[in-house]
Amino acid sequence: MSDLEQFRTDTRKWLAANCPPGARGPGQVANGSSKIKIRDPDVTLWLDRMAEKGWTVPTWPREYGGGGLSTAEYVVLLEEMRAIGARPPLVNRGTSMVGPTLLEVGSEDQKKRHLPAIARGEGEWCQGYSEPGAGSDLASLRTSAVLDGDHFVINGQKTWTSDADTSDWMFMLVRSDPDVPKHEGISFLLLTMDQPGISTTPIEMISGGSPFSETFFDNAFADKDDLIGGLNQGWSVGKRLLQHERSGMESLISGSAGTRPVGLVDTARGFLGEVDGRIADDLARDDVLQYEMHMRALQLTQRRSVEESSDGRTPGPATSIFKTVGTDLEKRYAELMTSLRGTQGYGWEGDSFSDEELAATRRFLQSRAASIYSGSNEIQRNIIAKRVLGLPD
């Protein structure tokens, strides 16, 4: 038996013995927030057991709370988790965005202070990038940070801050030198959200939810020791973090980025019927088939990109390809999940619609933003043209 086969056998046994029933199948996933109540104690138990194993961040080095797994071992772990329906023990921007960035550019002190806590799920993170006048042109941001002794004093505003009202920490881009070209005067900071100088106001969306907030900074503080990558060097740090956001390690390997492929075929069969095991309506069957084929092609391409990397790191500019294709597929999925239901797919309220049908309507509306957040698809195509294809400006 090879070492990888032995690892699979051992992993299968450990998961069977340690993944509690309440952490299998659909349900809540911990995100580390101190402000969100965990409804099922099995979710907390699962997080604690996986964190002790180092498998909340399986490929991170053990000294920072990770499992030290190779890319091949990580693939096996994900496959065995899916085989028993195990949910991820922890999903947040700490494990998928700021943590991998700290591993690459953080100082040893910063790694030791932040990474083990992230791996244990001690705090939810939010992203302070976009501003009212700096969205697609992010380098035009104006939120200022002035060094005052051992702290930076921060003033300004961020917008579209996902989960700002429930987060414990923020990673953010700030204007630290207003007198140089805009890309050269930006710094990358970490700061706690629980301080008097920070306030948040949720933004209600057309879908009925409020996943985003406006975030205001009035003499907020960030420790000088939490300046990442050096003063006025934040633009390159921020760009690398966006590559992790667009296609993090787990979504690349598992092929789950940006889409929800579960239930599409069953929904079509349930509302349109089936003939000889096939969706009865020819046009609908073709639509579903086209989606599934494109989704599978994206998954295989994502997985290959990681397997071709000797160290398992997130790819560079090529992640813009995954973001562009993935968000287009996410919108297409939401369109199909509503249109396949006919008039039952567009209900907003009322007893004539099931909870699932009402949720599908809201997912459809929310999906419209997929090609805008994390960098619009137009920006991604510019990145692909210049940094992947090498075309001139």
Image (cartoon, rainbow, N blue to C red):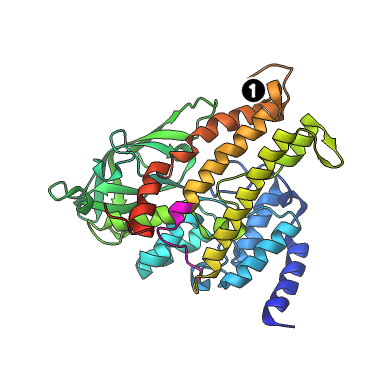
Q: Is residue 28 visible?
A: no
Give the total number of marks visible in the rendering.
1
Q: Please state the extent of the stretch shown in magenta in the rendering.
A: 312-321
Residue 180, position as x, y percentages in the image: 14, 50
The image shows residue 133, relative to residue 314, as above or below, that is: above
State the image coordinates of residue 68 (x, y, percent, origin top left).
55, 73
Q: Which residue shows up at 49% across the image and 68% down it? A: 64
- Camera-nearest residue between 87 and 34: 87
Q: Residue 140 location in percent, x, y?
A: 24, 42
In this view of the protein, which residue sits in the foreground, 226 or 127? Answer: 127
SS category of the residue bearing label 1: helix
Q: Is residue 76 magenta-colored?
A: no
Can residue 233 be spotted in the picture? yes
Q: Is 32 positioned to the left or the right of 44 in the image?
A: left
Compared across the picture, whether 158 is left or right of 348 comes to: left
**Amino acid residing under circle 1:** Tyr
The residue at the point 31 percent across, 33 percent down is 132
Q: What is the residue that sits farthest to the front in this orientation? A: 282
Give the camera-side residue of 166 and 278.
278
For disc 1, the marked residue is 346
Q: Residues within 10 Å of mark 1 (few under 14, many from 20)?
A: some
Q: Quadrant of residue 283?
A: top right
Foreground: 116 or 82?
Answer: 82
Can you say whether 280 is above or below 256 in the image? above
Q: Residue at x 74, y 35 (%)?
A: 282
Q: Residue furthest left?
A: 179
Question: Which residue occupies 61% across, 67% down?
Answer: 74
- Residue 388 in the image: state x and y as whole percent: 38, 59
Is the N terminus in the top left, top right, bottom left or bottom right quadrant? bottom right
Magenta-drawn stretch, dominant element (helix, strand or loop): loop
Residue extending farthest bottom: 1
